[in-house]
Amino acid sequence: MVAVAPSETRSHTILIAEDEVLVRIMVAEALRDAGYAVIEAIDADEAIRVLRTSADVKLLISDIRMPGSMDGVALARVVRAEHPGVKVLLVSGDLTGVCPTEHDGAFLKPYNVSRLLRAVENLLASGTA
């Protein structure tokens, strides 16, 4: 995992929507080690509940393929409509057909933690991943 000095602590809150428990834990731990506050959701429905009750979330990282009432792309559409200030980073093993206007960035699985952290940092700093 990537560690940061206390002076590098970031103030951004990131919401992770990922149904695979071990993947979610790994990503959340890496982000926390990098100084981010992290909220975890098991699916899109839980992510929406979090977003409706927390004004602090700056970035949603969502798997595209999740069980439940909607996938990550549909979740991204809801976030765009209801929470336009929240950036969206979609993640999948296959990004074919994902429309670039539905997200701020896309990340291909399997996760490379250092690449993910760079993408998150760039996205939060400049608006692109």
Image: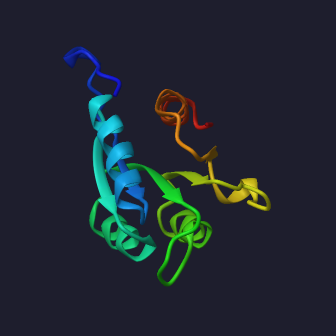
Foreground pick, 100 / 63: 63
Q: Is residue 23 above or below residue 5?
A: below
Quadrant of the rendered image containing residue 52? bottom left
Q: Position of residue 105 (x, y in %)?
A: 63, 45
Q: In the rendered view, would you say 10 is above or below 72? A: above
Position of residue 54 in the picture relative to residue 96 (left or right): left
Q: How many marks?
A: 0
Taking 78 as reference, is 46 left or right? left
Q: Residue furthest bottom?
A: 69
Q: Say above or below: 9 vs 23.
A: above
Residue at 60% over, 69% down: 77
x, y (%) of residue 49? 33, 73
**Whole-percent x, y for residue 78 in the image:** 54, 71
- State the scheme by which the image is colored: rainbow
Frontmost residue, 123 versus 68? 68
Q: Tell me the quarter of the image containing the C terminus.
A: top right
Identify the residue at image location x=47%, y=81%: 68
Question: What residue sits 31% from the left and 66% below the top?
Answer: 50
Which residue is located at x 64 percent, y 54 percent? 93
Location of residue 13 by image quarter: top left
Q: Residue furthest left?
A: 6
Quarter containing the N terminus: top left
How far across and down, in percent of the image, does residue 121 sit? 48, 30
